[in-house]
Image (tube, coloured by chain):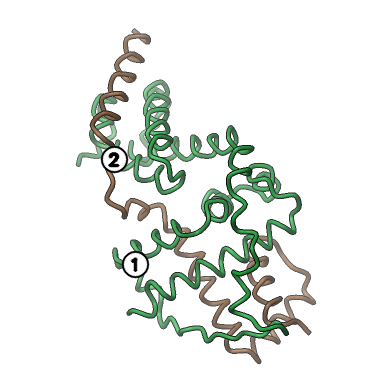
Chain colours: A green, B brown
Amino acid sequence: MTQSNNESPENWLNDYGDILYRFALARVRSEATAEDLVQETLLAGFLAFDKFSGNSTVRTWLVGILKHKIIDHYRKHSRELTLLNNDESANDVLAYQFDQQGNWQVDLVEWGTPDKSMDDEQFWLAFNDCLTRLPQRMADLLLLRTVDGLETEECCALLGFESDNQLWVTLSRTRVKLRQCLETNWFSKE
Amino acid sequence: MYKCKEIIELTSKEMDISLPWVTRMEMKLHFLMCKTCSRYAKQLQFMNKALGALEGHSHAENCQLSDSAKQRIAKKMQQAKEAVK
């Protein structure tokens, strides 16, 4: 794949379409929506190509546009998303990990030197798989907050949390769930 | 004194906002005494690091745009090109 900085928009669909599509699909979990996002991204890139500075690759630049499109998508659809996803409210996430007094009742597996996992493509398969297994709103929250760096207030507004506290609690539970899945899917198997 | 269940919530919260130093001290003390919570905190930090690197790896699943989607998008690109002319 070429990554020169003066490539023509006509080749974008072939060169970057699939990359953008996978990126979008990992976030929105709907093929039709992901396709729309790729289309919007390529069109926006085409119309703004004269603003492309050449400081990054076209690929990085297009992914940047796609990220904005994804956040826009959440903004446009926040109400529907909230109604769809109330499945994480159940307390069961923590119930089996802690006893009545709030002490651990499971043992956490030692992860050794997890950093070296990051060089392993298999690890990323497991990691992405665990993200997909999270309830949608939990995954949305975690990624909007930690990957996209959106402020707490905006996350609350987009995903329909009524208070900061509700958001912190959900974020913590999301991490508990993700950690548990990584342990089962990866670190217990190594 | 915080319970383990509260400590893991604070551990998560600390990644997003700064906590009062009294709370941080109590957490440190708890980690010294509780191996499981201390392990949990380390694993959460690793997860954050991995999330930061996710962008280069979210392509892991092997999906492609369908031919019909490609055709549709190519057509839109073509229309946009003609409109700009």
Question: Looking at this view, is B63 or B57 the one in front?
Answer: B63
Q: Is residue B56 left or right of residue B51?
A: left
Q: Is residue A15 above or below residue B73?
A: below
Q: Quadrant of residue A170?
A: bottom right
Q: Quadrant of residue B44?
A: bottom right
Kindly identify the residue that appears in the image at 53 percent across and 77 percent down: B42
Q: Is residue A95 above or below residue A166?
A: below
Q: Is residue A18 above or below residue A8?
A: below
Quarter of the image with the N terminus of chain B is bottom right
> Which residue type does callout 1 highlight?
Phe
Q: Is residue A84 left or right of residue A160?
A: left
Q: Is residue A124 left or right of residue A33?
A: left
- Disc ID at residue B13: none
Residue A65 x/y as whole percent? 45, 35
Residue A92 x/y as whole percent? 61, 69
Question: What secondary structure is marked by label 2?
Answer: helix
**CA separation in Å, label 1 and label 2:** 21 Å
Question: Looking at this view, is A154 or B17 the one in front?
Answer: A154
- Disc ID at residue A123: 1
Residue A145 x/y as whole percent? 59, 53
Which residue of the protein is positioned furthest toward the bottom in this rendering?
Answer: B33
Quarter of the image with the C terminus of chain B is top left
The residue that label 2 is drawn on is A18
Question: What is the chain letter for disc 2?
Answer: A
